[in-house]
């Protein structure tokens, strides 16, 4: 059995074949603004327990801002959907930065909904679009 060569075979270079290097952009992403063309929120924060200062930007920063403003009550996934389509991904990015965010399930008529609460106390050092 030949090892995987990462698309370097004849099909990758055949005219008209689609691979990661030559695939045309799908219509959904064709006009998507790049990060350099739009202003993006940036937050610099430090943990109150003496952790290092960290910086997040974009939708992750907006999620952190919403969780800080929500306080003990927390923010539901419905609240966070105004930030972007995948609130759990932005919460995961915060968890990867070392912040403790817990999620509890709440019953709703349609099923259940998640409520996220920021457990780690943080202090905002700087907020803006350019830092």
Image: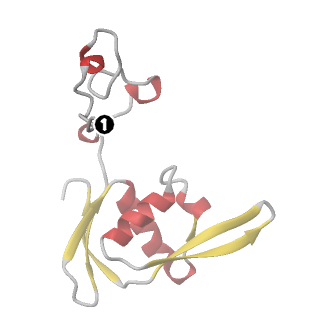
Relative placement, left or right, of 53 versus 70 is left
Question: Looking at this view, is 14 or 3 the one in front?
Answer: 3
Q: Which residue is mark 1?
A: 1
Please identify the quarter of the rendering in which residue 12 is found: top left
Question: How many numbered circles are shown?
Answer: 1
- Vertically, is 127 above or below 48? above
Please identify the residue farthest to the bottom as the structure is shown: 49
Relative placement, left or right, of 119 versus 53 is right
Question: Looking at this view, is 8 or 84 the one in front?
Answer: 8
Please identify the quarter of the rendering in which residue 127 is found: bottom left
Q: Position of residue 5 (x, y in %)?
A: 23, 34
Question: Looking at this view, is 29 or 55 the one in front?
Answer: 29
Give the residue at x 34% y 54%: 58
Question: Looking at this view, is 31 or 11 the one in front?
Answer: 11
Give the residue at x 23% y 39%: 36
Give the residue at x 49% y 61%: 88
**From the image, which quarter does the N terminus lie in?**
top left
Q: Position of residue 23 (x, y in %)?
A: 34, 22
- Vertically, is 104 above or below 82? below
Q: Position of residue 60 (x, y in %)?
A: 37, 60
Give the residue at x 40% y 68%: 64
């Amino acid at each position: 059995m030949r090892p995987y060569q990462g698309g370097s075979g004849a099909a990758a270079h055949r005219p008209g074949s689609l691979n990661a290097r030559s695939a045309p952009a799908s219509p959904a992403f064709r006009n998507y603004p790049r990060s350099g063309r739009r202003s993006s929120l940036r937050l610099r924060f430090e943990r109150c327990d003496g952790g290092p200062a960290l910086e997040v930007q974009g939708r992750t920063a907006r999620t952190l801002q919403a969780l800080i403003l929500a306080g003990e009550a927390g923010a539901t996934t419905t609240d966070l959907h105004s930030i972007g389509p995948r609130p759990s991904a932005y919460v995961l990015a915060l968890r990867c930065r070392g912040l403790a965010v817990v999620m509890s399930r709440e019953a709703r008529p349609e099923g259940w909904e998640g409520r996220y609460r920021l457990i780690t106390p943080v202090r905002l050092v700087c907020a803006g679009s350019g830092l």
